């Protein structure tokens, strides 16, 4: 989800917009050398600490970068960043590239760099292009393995999910994973239909990921608190059930307004606690299904 969109939605729902520059970021242990710096509105940042330079997953907002840098300096290995991974293009995961990425290799899926190199518009909000030095300098098509010392860190691309350029980062030895925005823990997600996001293939990818994760895996979501496999399964089931309900209404010939006005059953109420309303979520699901 983009920062601009997030601010817009906050304004819409009278939610105070967080002030990232004033937040004290702290890195919470996940497993072994893996840490999570909570996004507080922007995307959650993952860290694999190493004396030779950390692998950092997503860069949050530029205004939060000094706090993130301070949190990194308190970790084993210190504040040096060797690789900065972008899980996808949205500005709440990439706006800090310039501040955090200097001296690091910025790594992302092939589809991310061209989106960051040009101004983007998302739900009526515009995001500026990043300067050349803040763009990914290493891109990949399907899979890439980075190393923190002798620790392999696997980057796997899943096409057609939250966007069409999503990367999930697996640290298998420590049963840890950073899902990017393929996982909003406990809340309706944004779905970037305009940039290749697709709800049905998203569900299939989550099935594939869940089938391969150990039962006690520790999961960093793009948004929300550190999660378990059960949390990820609950999110997968919510996506699948949403697609099923909206698909049934579309088969009955209902219009977008009718689909939205019908709402969702009471069981979905807990998912409304994030920044997407039920009506906004239903519209995104409808638009995704209407494309196929
Ligand atoms: Zn996103």
Image (cartoon, rainbow, N blue to C red):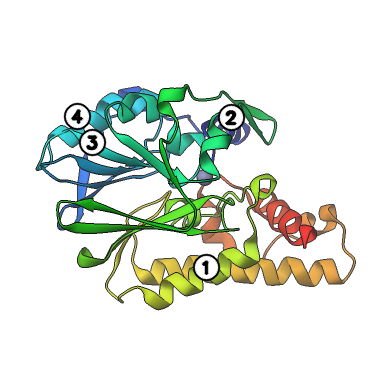
Secondary structure of the residue carrying tag 3 is: strand
Q: Which residue is mark 2?
A: 11
Q: Nearer the viewer, residue 79 or 186?
A: 79
- Circle nearer the N terminus (4, 1): 4
Task: In the rendered view, tell whether residue 274 sits above or below residue 217.
Answer: above
- Circle nearer the N terminus (2, 1): 2
115 vs 82, left or right, is right
Is there any visible trace of residue 207 in the rendered image?
A: yes
Q: Give the distance between the C-alpha atoms of the residues marked 2 and 3, in whole angstroms.
A: 35 Å
Report x, y in % for residue 177.
33, 60
Q: Which residue is mark 3?
A: 81
Tell us which disc is closer to us: 2 or 3.
3
**Classed neighbour count for the residue bearing mark 4: other residues with Cα under 10 Å, few (<14), some (14–19), many (≥20):** some
**Classed neighbour count for the residue bearing mark 1: other residues with Cα under 10 Å, few (<14), some (14–19), many (≥20):** some
- Circle nearer the N terminus (2, 3): 2
Is there any visible trace of residue 267 in the rendered image?
A: no
Q: Give the distance between the C-alpha atoms of the residues marked 4 and 3, in whole angstroms.
A: 12 Å
Disc number at residue 280? Answer: none
């Amino acid at each position: 989800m983009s920062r601009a969109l997030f601010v817009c939605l906050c304004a819409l729902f009278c939610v105070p917009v967080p002030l990232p520059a004033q937040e004290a970021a702290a890195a919470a242990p996940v497993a072994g050398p893996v840490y999570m710096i909570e996004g507080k509105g922007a995307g959650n940042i993952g860290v694999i600490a190493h004396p030779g330079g950390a692998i950092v997953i997503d860069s949050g907002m530029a205004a939060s970068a000094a706090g993130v840098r301070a949190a990194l300096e308190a970790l084993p290995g210190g504040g040096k960043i060797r690789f900065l991974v972008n899980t996808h293009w949205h500005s709440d995961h990439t706006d800090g590239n310039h501040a955090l990425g200097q001296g690091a290799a910025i790594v992302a899926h092939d589809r991310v760099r061209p989106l960051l190199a040009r101004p983007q518009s998302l739900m009526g909000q515009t995001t500026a292009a990043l300067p050349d030095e803040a763009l990914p300098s290493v891109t990949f098509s399907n899979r890439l393995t980075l190393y923190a010392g002798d620790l392999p860190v696997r980057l796997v691309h899943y096409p057609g999910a939250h966007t069409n350029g999503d990367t999930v980062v697996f640290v298998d030895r420590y049963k840890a994973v950073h899902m990017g925005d393929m996982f909003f823990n406990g809340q309706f997600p944004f779905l970037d239909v305009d940039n290749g996001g697709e709800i049905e293939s998203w569900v299939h990818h989550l099935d594939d990921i869940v089938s391969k994760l150990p039962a006690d895996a520790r999961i960093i979501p793009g948004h929300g608190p550190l999660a378990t496999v059960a949390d990820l399964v609950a999110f997968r089931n919510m996506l699948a059930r949403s697609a099923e309900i909206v698909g049934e209404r579309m088969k009955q010939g209902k219009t977008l307004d009718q689909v939205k006005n019908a709402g969702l059953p009471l069981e979905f109420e807990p998912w409304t606690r994030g920044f997407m309303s039920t009506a906004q979520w239903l519209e995104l699901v409808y638009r995704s299904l209407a494309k196929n």
